[in-house]
Amino acid sequence: MKHEENPWSKGIVLICTKCHKSISPKLLEEEGNSADNLKMFLKKSFKESGDGSKIRVVTTSCLDVCIDDTQAVTFASTEGETETFAIHPEKDREKLLKHLYQKIK
């Protein structure tokens, strides 16, 4: 097995794609999968701020945090800390972004 250095320096964000099925379409304004939309929002925000290399944002299958009408998101720091959130993928994304910026600074 070959060991590689971490391509991101501060951590990784995992966004559950399965959660989209449990969120009522009435609660979403954007078209498409809420996990993909949140991923693109976060990636664009980090890239624009110059922090794109500090954090990786990816979608994943079920995180096993199943709460109706919420999106499961996990942040795993390269320092070993892991946090999991159940958020609204549109209304709470600015708050999540702010929290993640604090974690990677």
Image: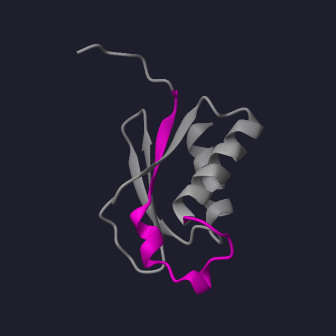
Find residue 5 and report its horizontal and vertical position in percent.
42, 17
Q: Check the picture and name the quadrant holding the N terminus.
A: top left
> Where is 59 relative to 1, above or below?
below
Find residue 77 and report its horizontal and vertical position in percent.
44, 39
Q: Nearer the viewer, residue 103 or 50?
A: 50
- Confirm whether the magenta stretch covers residue 14: yes
- Farthest bottom residue in view: 26
Q: Check the picture and name the quadrant holding the C terminus.
A: top right
- Confirm whether the magenta stretch covers residue 102: no
- Farthest left residue in view: 1
**Number of marks in the image?**
0
Would you say 82 lies left or right of 32 here?
Answer: left
Find residue 28 and report its horizontal and vertical position in percent.
62, 77
Residues rendered magenta in the picture: 8-33
State the residue at coordinates (38%, 16%): 4
- Farthest front residue in view: 32
